[in-house]
Image (cartoon, rainbow, N blue to C red):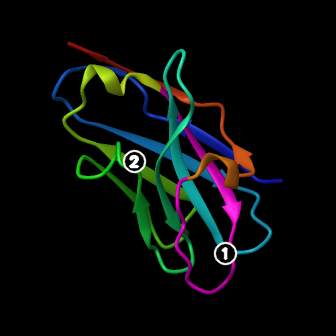
Amino acid sequence: QVQLVESGGDTVQSGESLRLSCVATGFSRDSYAIGWFRQAPGKEREGLSAISSVDGGAYYGDSAEGRFTTTFRDAAKNTVYLQMNNLQPNDTATYYCAARYIPSTPVVVTPMVVLYDYWGRGTQVTVLP
C-alpha cells in the first residue's frame, strides 16, 4: 500500500521561502507520479505540481508557475520536494502530496486532484502579512 508523509510546514512572513518534503513508500512498480496540492479553509483543493518517476518531468498549475519548484531528492525518487518562494498570505493552506501509478513510457503528469489515488495527511503552511 502506498503511503505518503508530508513535512516542512511552518509559519513564515510574507516574501519568505519554504521547502516541503514528501516521503512516499510502498510502490509496487517504479512508474508513478507524485503531486503537490493545497487546500485553504472554505476552498476547493487545488493542484500545484506533479513530477514523473519515469522521466523526471515536472508540471505546474497556474498558482505554482514561476514561484514553486518540484524535484526528487535523489535517484531513489521516493522523496519529493516542493520549494516555494516569495510566499504570500494567500498561500496559507494545508499542503498535501499524493501519488498515482502511470504508464512506464513518458507522459504528461498534470496535478489534477481527481487523478490521484493515494494521499498524505497534509502539512500546514501559514504566511503572515
Say which element carries label 2.
Answer: strand
- Circle 2: is it few (<14), some (14-19), or many (20+) Cα within 10 Å? many
* Residue 86: percent from left, percent from top: 19, 35
Query: Magenta stretch: residue 103 in it?
Result: yes
* Residue 29: percent from left, percent from top: 75, 74
Boundaries of the magenta span: 94-111
| Three-letter residue code for mark 1 | Ser
Query: Magenta stretch: residue 67 in it?
Result: no
What residue does disc 2 label?
A: 82
Looking at the rendered structure, which numbered label has been put on residue 1?
A: none
Estimate the spatial distance between the alpha carbons at disc 2 and disc 1, rounded to whole Å.
20 Å
| Residue 93 versus residue 67 in the image, above or below | above
Q: How many marks?
A: 2
Q: Quadrant of the C terminus?
A: top left
Q: Quadrant of residue 96?
A: top right
What residue does disc 1 label?
A: 31
Is 82 or 64 nearer to us in this picture? Answer: 64
Q: Residue at position x 23%, y 52% from top?
A: 66
Taking 46 as reference, is 61 left or right? left
Inspect this view and state whether residue 72 appears.
no
Q: Quadrant of residue 125?
A: top left
